[in-house]
Amino acid sequence: VRNPQPQRVIVMLDPGHGGADPGAVGIGGLQEKSVVMAVSQHVATILQQQGGMVQMTRRGDQTVDLQPRVDMAEAANATVFVSIHANAVAGQRPEVNGLETYYYSEAGLQLANILHRRVMGTVAMQDRGVKQARFFVLRRTSMPAALIEIGFVTGSADAPKLRNPTWQGQMGQAIATGILD
Ligand code: ZN
């Protein structure tokens, strides 16, 4: 018997860091936690406008540990988990810039590929590829999960973009479209 209920799709968005944890701090004191929150809010708004169910692991500048982020996704029985971060390199290496998308499981690889392709096709930046990593939120979530590093706060090309509200909106739109893909 066919289920008469439409399948309930829930996107769990995970803006990295927050509160006491600024994440990476880059050129001019640019903080990862602020950049990823701004972009995540654009993603959430766009998905909601498209009728999507969205939940976020943090709504503002709050400290949230990694396990509670996973617990929220599991409790919601989220369809996909998308973690949004910004990158940094140690030392004075402003020449390192670009987009990286991470996955752990095979299902996560598919999600990471789709997201990465959409962002690279929309936003002008260097392509550092899709990579596997043992990040906690990727390993411990049971649904397809990807972690997108939207640029380097330490990069001379990326940092001005990351702090630009117009660019943040474009990146948010690209990630939202990737999730819809
Ligand atoms: Zn991070």
Image (cartoon, rainbow, N blue to C red):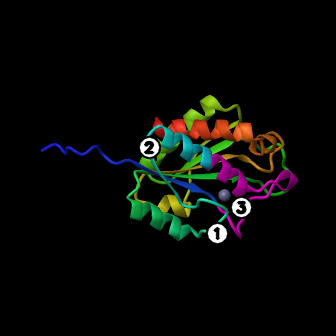
| Amino acid type, mark 2 | Gly
Q: Which residues are magenta?
A: 17-40
- Residue 110 screen position, x and y as percent: 45, 42
| Amino acid type, mark 1 | Thr
Q: What is the C-alpha distance between the residues marked 3 and 1?
A: 11 Å
Taking depth in this image into account, of 166 and 146 the one nearest to the observer is 166
Q: Is residue 132 left or right of residue 127?
A: left
Of marks 2 and 3, the one in the foreground: 2
Mark 2 or 1, nearer chain start: 2
Neighbour tally class for label 2: few under 14, some 14-19, many 20 plus, Cα within 10 Å: some
Ligand 1 is found in the corner quadrant, namely bottom right
- Residue on which disc 3 sits: 23
Answer with the quarter of the image where residue 128 lies.
Answer: top right
The structure residue drawn at horizontal position 81% and vertical position 42%, both measured from the top left corner, is 160
The structure residue drawn at horizontal position 84% and vertical position 43%, both measured from the top left corner, is 156
Q: What is the C-alpha distance between the residues marked 2 and 1?
A: 26 Å
Some atom of ligand 1 lies within 8 Å of the CB belonging to the residue at label 3: yes
| Amino acid type, mark 3 | Gly
Question: Does the stretch in magenta take in 156?
Answer: no
Instruction: Identify the residue at the far top of this view.
Output: 121
- Residue 82 screen position, x and y as percent: 52, 51
Mark 3 or 1, nearer chain start: 3
- Residue on which disc 1 sits: 63
- Residue 133 screen position, x and y as percent: 56, 55
In the displayed structure, 23 sits above or below 173; it is: below
- Residue on which disc 2 sits: 52
Taking depth in this image into account, of 12 and 42 the one nearest to the observer is 42
Taking depth in this image into account, of 15 and 42 the one nearest to the observer is 42
The structure residue drawn at horizontal position 75% and vertical position 53%, both measured from the top left corner, is 88
